[in-house]
Amino acid sequence: MSQIRRVAILAEGSFSLFGAKTAVGVLRYSRHETVAVIDSQHAGKTVGDVLPFGGGIPIVASVAEALNYKPEVLLIGIAPTGGQLPPSFRHAILMGIENGLDIWSGLHYFLSDDEELVKEAARCGVHLWDVRKPRPGLVVGSGKALSAQAYVILTIGTDCNVGKMTAALELRNALAKHGLKPAFVATGQTGILIEGDGTPLDAVPGDFMAGEVERLVMRCDAEGADVILVEGQGSILHPGFGPVTLALMLGSMPDAYILCSVPSRTTYRPDHVIPIPPVRDVIRLYEDFMAVSYKAPKVQGVALNTSELSEDEAKQTIIHYEEDLKLPVCDPIRTGVSPLVERLIPLIVAKRQQSDK
């Protein structure tokens, strides 16, 4: 993963801001070069025609067309609930293998356990990388992150797919510009594809989830990070993904939270049946939970995803949240993270000074 690769992203039938989470994250943050996106519904357009970024990267109808742009890797760019391989993707993957492309996948369905794909990959001399396959030698959490000298920030959410990875990466980049040494802990398939390292937390057996987060936090701490940004997953009350959020809280033992939310969303994805509680109640729950026995992390700011709102609606929404919550609020992409950085830097510096005594 140290070598920069030319990547074609397979997002057939799903290429949109919320429909192809993995594709969007890789396009925005990966050091690898995306040369084409495959989605027949948008063929003939560019990424910039569909997303608010991406410029002139072409969208094509098939792997055969993508080959004209000389990719080295075919990356599965969707993250469907349940993480299974869409049957329609098999032909595209086989064509990629036959044309010498490595296959990178963040699905729960492991390509390296698929006899046909493994056989074809061996025949063609290509590599299948299952990002969500946990490493051997998993560890159980023990609370070690309580002793971390770095300032630990966990991005939390009112729901899944609200921008927790985006907020963490934008903060990482901004804090580095201020002369700090930040580290990013990837805990989902997209973050791992971007960083080349991390733990696929939702694929780790429950007993080891907190331990794997703890391991990565303490590794970053030992490497001298000033601040460790842990990528959040799910939401504490989410009926499907709450346990992963709890493992992140217990594994990272954060000093602070950044709450992430889509203000236009009122029910939990993906079923849109159960209502999301008011933001104030969500904040209180996160803060009170850890304070009972461990640290007492506070929500130090809010990162909104306002992509579904107009410019004026987004501005007014941010003002409303600031006035209501008495916290710095931003949209990391639309307005930048400066309000959060201004709040966090004194806290980061204070902990580092205390740790150095």
Image (cartoon, rainbow, N blue to C red):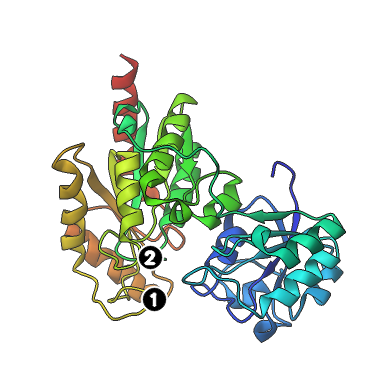
| Residue 113 appears in the picture as rendered | yes
Mark 2 element type: loop
Which residue is situated farthest in the top direction here? 357
Q: Is residue 319 above or below residue 342?
A: below
The residue sitting at 29% across, 76% down in the picture is 267
Q: Nearer the viewer, residue 91 or 325?
A: 91
Q: Residue furthest front?
A: 115
Q: Residue at x 74, y 82 (%)?
A: 44
Give the residue number, with chain letter if any, for mark 2. 160
Tell me, yes or no, if residue 341 can be seen here: no
Q: Seen in the image, is 131 located left or right of residue 98?
A: left
* Quadrant (top left, top right, bottom left, bottom right) of the C terminus: top left
Q: Residue at x 28, y 81 (%)?
A: 273
What residue is drawn where x is 82% and y is 56%? 122
Asked which secondary structure carries label 1, the reply is loop
For the N terminus, the image quarter is top right
**Image quarter of residue 165:** bottom left
| Image coordinates for residue 201, horizontal then vertical, percent | 45, 51
Up/down of 306 relative to 188, above or below: below
Q: Which residue is mark 1?
A: 270
Q: Which residue is at the far bottom?
A: 41
